Each structure stands twice: as C-alpha cells, then as structure tokens.
Amino acid sequence: MKRLTLLLSLPALLAACALQPALPPAASRLAPSQLGLSDEAPADAAARAALPRSDWWTELNAPELNALMQRALGEAPSLAQARARIQRAQASIENAESSERAAIGLGLDAARQRFPEHSIYPPPLAGTIRNTATLQASASYEWDFFGRHQSELNAALGSAQAARADAAAAQLMLSSQLARSYVQLARVLAQRELLARQSAEREQALALVRQRSQVGLDTAQDLRAAELPLPELRRQALQLDEQADLLRHQLAALSAQPMAALKDLKPALPAALPLAGEGALGLDLLGRRPDVVAARWRVEAATAQVSSARAQFYPNISLGAFVGFNAIGFDNLLKSGSLQYGVAPSLRLPLFDSGRLRAQLRGTAAEADAAVAAYNGALLEAVRDASDQLRSLRSLQEQRAEQAAAQAHVQAALELARQRHSAGLGNRLAVLNASQSLLQQQRQALDLQAQTLDAQLNLLRSLGGGWTEAKP
C-alpha cells in the first residue's frame, strides 16, 4: 500500500517542480565531409608510415636536439601547468564520484556549560554548571533518480579528457617550437660561414681592383664599386650574430636553462625528412590533433552540464540516519540510557526559485553552444593548418628544383671563368666575381633547405605529432 501511494504521488511531485524554460535549438558540429576530409583513415603501410611518430624529432639525427627536448619536456613550466590542470580535473572526477556513495561521519562534541534558571531546564539542572558530551555516527545518501549526479560525473570526465588533450597540445607546441628554433639556429650559423667566405673573396677582389687602379687599368669608379659590398656584408654578419644569440636564448628558455647555458651551441643543419604527407587529410586527423580532441571533449562536458542543469528542476530525495550517545556528565556518556538514534528522510522540491534554475539552464546551454562553436573553429583551423603546410612543402620542393638548376648554371660559369684564367684569357677578378655568384646561390639553397625542413616540422605539428588519444 505504501509503495502504491508513493507511485501515485510521483506525478504530483513532478508536476510541482519548477517549469523548465524553452531553449533555442542547440548548435551542431561541422561534419568532416563539409571540410573535404576523406571518410577513411590510411590503410596501407606506406600511408601509415607517412604519419609522424611520437618521438618524431629523433629522425633529425641530432643528439643535441634530443637532449634539449628531453630536458624541455621534463622541466618546462608550461607543461607543469598542464599537468596541474590534469590533477585538478582528476580531483573533480573524484568529487563527482563521491556523490554516488553514502556519506558517513563520526563526531564527538564536549562542552562545559551553565544551565540558566529561566529556560527550559528544570531543577536540579537549572543554575548549575555541568559537562555535556555527544558521540554520534551519521550516514546520508542521496538517490540520483533524475541523473544529476551521473551528468556531473560525465562533465568531470569530459573536462579531465580535455585537460589531458590540452597537455598533449602544449607538449606538441613546445617540441615543435624547440625543433624549429634548433633548425633556425643551424641555418643562421651555416649562413654565417658562407657570408664569411663571401667577405673574404670580396676583400681579395678589392685588393685586385686597388692594384689595377694604381697602374691605371681600373678607374676610381671601379674602385668605389669594389668597396661598396663590404659594409653591407659586415652588416649582414652582425645581423646573423644577433639572430644566433637570440635563438640560443630561445632554446635555453624553452628547455628551462639559464640564457648563457647554450652560448657554445653550434648545431649543423639536418637533412630534410623523408616526409611527403600525401593523403594525411583524412578523417583520422580529428583524432590525431590534440587541440581538436580537447575541443570535442569540452563539448561533451558542456552537454553533460546542460543535463545536470535540467536535473535541478526535479525533486531531490535523500535519506539520513544517526546513532550515538548524548549525556550530561562525561561518566554517563556510554551508558545505555544515553543512546539516541534516528532516521531523517528528506524531499526537496524546487517550486519557486526566483528564476535561478532557469537562468542557470540558459547559461549552461549557451556555454554548450559556445563549446560547439569552439570545436568547429578548432576543426576548421586544423584542416586549414595541415592544408597550408602541405601546400608550402610542395612549393618549396618545386623551388628547390628550380634553384638547383640555376646553381648548376652558375657553377658552369665559374668553371668557364677558371678555365679562361688558366689559359690566360681572363683575369682573377672574373673568377672571384663568378665565385661570388655561386656563393649567393649556395646561400639561397641553404635557405630553401632550412625552409623545407621548417615546413616539414610544421606539417608534423599540424598532423598531431604522432599523438593518439588514450581511451578514457
């Protein structure tokens, strides 16, 4: 009979709850097909091999870079912050899980007090000073009939997964920036060596022009023209020296070291990676980009928060119980006559809350829409980023082919100038001028090599850097 009464009263309880507001249609996620992503992940071995490894920087065969990377990944402040956010999210999960379990407590209270004559206490208590004590165990449990606790737990789980993906994104950004700075430092140092050769040959050419000018073979104008390139070359040398120092400072900061720790670092420019990236823009890109995965989990967490906010409109049913001892006088505390116990069921109905629950639901729904918009933006940016890096890499490969052809022509011109000089048909100055053209082409080739490697590193980053999402 009691169960039947409870079942019959349930509709009345639900009808007595606060009315939920009408919400606008929820935002929807972009479908991968809208962005031109293929529906299938790479299936063959060659396509999978084109995807980056988790330790992709080791393929550069640079032990100094490996050491810097190991230090940076272990001691960088940005990654320490990310790990702290993961721990905070894990604590939120534990807090949400605790709502599913009964709360049990034990308390002991003791006091020495005077009982007043003009109160509820009769003689002989009135007007006396006595010791009082309470020793009590209590337990309470709240039933999750409407899924509020489960929604809170789902929201906490989503936030924790987003925090883990954020940490992976921070690690990927740090490793990418470190590798790119290392490559840039190698490029600057290699350029500095070529520039030193250019300056030395310009000095030799100037000395020859001075000799020719003294004997009347060259004019003062020829002498001024030979002097003109040297100040510019010295300026470029100063600029490259500054860039090298700044890049060393950046590498030291990224690897959590003093600014002067890498003052003697002189890396060689690594060779280009065997990375094409064709077919990389597949559906699996969404699971390889930690920033996209983090945005997706934020949508899941925000959606769960909406469900939790909806559950606030329904009754809250809980049961509490206590058992213990209460006595006046410490010597009476544990006697059977001091025993007390009770049961305390509780029902809370949200009837009139001045619009608080409605505002809370509208707010969480708006946050869920914002999370969907952020996910769509992250997805668009991921596809654009990967597409841009692929396009840049293809362009650089074509540029390198054209530059190699131009350098071959300059090399042939230098060989011809040397042959003419050996045969007595030309002077040393023509050979030096041809050598300057070749050095200029070599500097362009060096820049294109570094740009290609930088584009490959950017492509590795845009493809997720070998990261894969761990199952929750």
Image: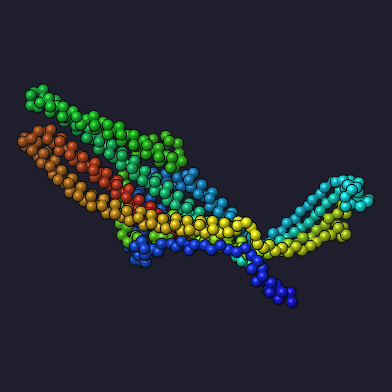
Query: On the rendered structure, is 128 left or right of 309?
Result: right
Task: Give the quarter of the figure containing the N terminus.
Answer: bottom right
Query: On the rendered structure, is 136 left or right of 263?
Result: right
Q: Position of residue 158 (x, y in %)?
A: 52, 59
Report the front residue among 338 and 210.
338
Query: On the rendered structure, is 112 left or right of 261?
Result: right
- Identify which residue is drawn at 88% across, 52% down: 120
Residue 426 can be seen in this image: yes
Q: Where 385 falls versus 432 (above or below)? A: below
Q: Where 158 falls versus 224 (above or below)? A: below
- Identify which residue is drawn at 80% across, 55% down: 135
Coloration of the structure image? rainbow
> Which residue is outermost to the top?
214
Report the front residue among 237 and 286.
286
Residue 49 can be seen in this image: no
Q: Position of residue 305 (x, y in %)?
A: 55, 59
Q: How many marks?
A: 0
Report the front residue among 137 and 226.
137
Report the front residue among 149 and 227.
149
Q: Position of residue 461 (x, y in %)?
A: 38, 52
- Identify which residue is drawn at 19% across, 29% down: 228
Q: Position of residue 17 (x, y in %)?
A: 64, 65
- Identify which residue is drawn at 77% across, 60% down: 322
Which of the 4 image quadrants contains residue 292? bottom left
